[in-house]
């Protein structure tokens, strides 16, 4: 919600922009409370999520970077740097997803019955080598097309939304 609200603040102007700017602070506070609660619950109820970081302490830098990115969101919003607030919100999402990946690797689905024997890991869930070769060809063709399309659409809809008499 916070990320979407910051995007709307970035893309609007006038009364709507000011209303959204006032409301985004509630969402920032809500996000930070949820972040703190989730972090505490992870440490308490899912200690296996930090095992890899304990083995390789430099991975704690990912968590520290996520924390700093999250703290920078309200700072940028208070300075009225909507674009930078959106960038730091995007970075924080990416870093939080990276923390989840670090915590779960190589387990994709952890078994609650017997985690060591019954969990679905990256290795026992992988497709055959032929399937992976075909998939990499499709990805090498498809991803540049998706990125080009996304860039094209972003260029078309760049800038703030203008509400005029002809708008619907």
Image: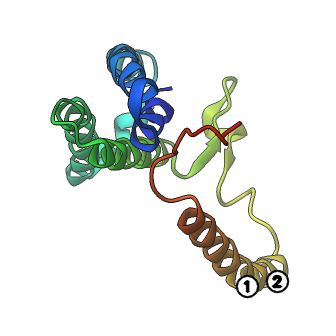
Position of residue 140 measured from the top left corner of the image (x, y, whole percent): 68, 84
- Give the secondary structure at mark 2: helix
Seen in the image, is 72 located left or right of residue 121? left
User: Which residue is at 63% across, 35% downward?
Assistant: 110
Image location (x, y in percent) of residue 157: 57, 58
- Sequence order check, earlier mark of 1 and 2: 2
Can you tell which quarter of the image residue 150 is in? bottom right
Q: CA distance from mark 1 to mark 2?
A: 11 Å
Residue 148 on image: x %, y %: 62, 77
Residue highlighted by disc 1: 141
Q: Badge 2: few (under 14), some or many (20 or more) residues near its Cα, within 10 Å? A: few
Residue occupying image coordinates x 72% and y 38%:
118
In the image, which disc is placed on residue 4? none
Which dot marks residue 134?
2
Q: Quadrant of residue 47?
A: top left
Quadrant of the image for the C terminus?
A: top right
């Amino acid at each position: 919600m916070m990320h979407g609200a910051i995007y709307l603040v970035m893309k609007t102007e006038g009364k709507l922009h000011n209303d959204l700017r006032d409301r985004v602070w509630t969402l920032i506070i809500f996000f930070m409370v949820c972040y703190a609660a989730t972090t505490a619950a992870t440490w308490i109820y899912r200690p296996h999520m930090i095992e890899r970081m304990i083995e390789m302490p430099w991975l704690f830098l990912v968590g520290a970077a996520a924390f700093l990115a999250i703290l920078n969101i309200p700072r940028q919003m208070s300075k009225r740097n909507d674009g930078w607030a959106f960038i730091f919100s995007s970075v924080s999402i990416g870093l939080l997803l990276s923390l989840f990946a670090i915590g779960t690797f190589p387990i994709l689905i952890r078994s609650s019955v017997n985690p060591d024997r019954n969990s679905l890991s990256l290795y026992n869930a992988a497709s055959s080598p032929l399937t992976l070769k075909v998939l990499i060809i499709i990805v090498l063709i498809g991803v540049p097309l998706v990125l080009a399309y996304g860039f094209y659409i972003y260029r078309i809809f760049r800038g703030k939304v203008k509400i005029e008499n002809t708008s619907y």
